[in-house]
Image: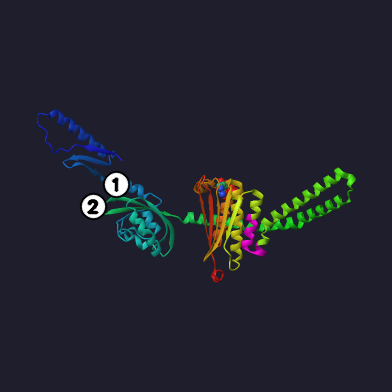
Amino acid sequence: MKITRHKSSSHPAPSRELAELRVRLAEADETLRAIRSGEVDAVVVAGKQGPQVFTLQGAEHAYRVLIESMNEGALTLMADKTILYANQCFARMVKCPLEQVTGSSFHRFLSAADRATLRPLLKRAGKSGSKIQVLLNAGDGSKMPAQISIRPLAKDGFNRATIGMVVTDMTEARRNEEMLRALTHRVVQVQEAERGRVAIELHDGITQLLCAILFRSQALVTSLAARDGPAKGEAMKLRELAGKTAEEVERISHNLRPSVLDQLGLVAALRATTTEFADRTGVAVKLACAKLNARLPADTELTLYRILQEALRNVEKHARARHVTVSLRQRAFVQLAINDDGIGFDPDHHAARRKGKGGLGLLSMRERATYVGGAFKIKSVRGAGTEIEVLIPLPPSATAAN
Ligand SMILES: Nc1ncnc2c1ncn2[C@@H]1O[C@H](COP(=O)(O)OP(=O)(O)OP(=O)(O)O)[C@@H](O)[C@H]1O
Ligand SMILES: [Mg+2]
């Protein structure tokens, strides 16, 4: 914005100071030229009560052209939510003629729930800006997902704060989110099916073969006499190695297809997983499990089990933790929390950076929780460990015994 200063002529110049008057005339000429050519948006005139700012109509016109050409709705509201000004884009969004939008209440475009969410924000908007997601009710009865950014504006002539709003159409963004969710869900489904297939192949194929090798090496150890010392030693090592390999394959197959979950239930499966993790990695794990009154729905149990596995995989891979706490609680919902005292990370930074090249672990945990109607939270601070928490509501039948 260009502002020019213009000296007030409230003090008459003495006639003898003709030269000074000439200079002032030249200045005034220059000011007029600048105003006419559109170089100036406002004039500051020094008066008795100090400098006064006069905004020029031409400047406002330029901003109006800019706002009308925006691809977002722009509005100014009075404190009682009456629309003082709306651009054409907003009128198109709510499918109402502009003349019916201006002067009406902004509330007519919101549901009761969105009005309630907006109310405290509008009050606070006097201090700082904020954003909310709403569903706009259009004039033809359709609904449009939108983001409203609220900004305080200068106080108006009646000394009441006016509010500036920018309304962004989120239809496309929501569609993309939906597509991403559907895709992630498909990935999780395919992953689960693939894990089952690999587990069966491992069990039916490799484990059977390894058992045969174990059996034969045992037979070899038995058939070799004491005089075949070195050969017998090698045969014993072979038998031991075959045994360890069979155990490792069994462990992998177990993790891939949680048969312990099917047979013994969630608590036993969580216990088996944490014990195996602690034994293998040396990280101390404390497990605090509430006694469940009944089996939880199968997809809830599988979700919790997979989230624990994925979280422990992350602890092992990234956290450098010394202690892990796993807790399971049940009320009207089931809550699983996994805490580690490792190096932590910045979840927001990770989400922003991911853009298709990051890992799938956190994404699939979130998707699994969302799919069963649950909520998934990550709390992590660099240097201060990580907490993964998942809350899944339970059907009344699962909580009745509480
Ligand atoms: N417990 C943790 N401690 C420290 N950093 C973590 C922890 N969990 C996740 N992270 C960080 O978050 C990132 C994303 O984790 P995510 O599980 O999504 O992917 P990944 O483990 O890298 O790959 P994938 O899970 O697909 O094998 C990790 O690369 C790591 O930087
Ligand atoms: Mg991971």
Judged from the image, the secondary structure of the residue bearing numbered disc 1 is helix
- Distance from disc 2 to disc 1, alpha carbons, whole Å, reads 17 Å
What amino acid type should be assigned to the residue bearing mark 2?
A: Gly
Q: Is residue 199 left or right of residue 395?
A: right
Q: Which residue is mark 1?
A: 60
> Mainly helix, strand or loop, the magenta region?
helix
Write the start and end of the magenta stretch as one range: 261-274
What amino acid type should be assigned to the residue bearing mark 1?
A: Glu
Q: Position of residue 117 (x, y in %)?
A: 39, 60
Q: Check the image and name the residue furthest to the left.
A: 15
Residue at the spot x=30%, y=53% of the render? 162
Position of the C terminus by quadrant: bottom right
Residue at the spot x=70%, y=54% of the render? 251
Q: Which residue is mark 2?
A: 157
Residue 267 drawn above or below residue 2: below
Residue at the spot x=32%, y=61% of the render? 105
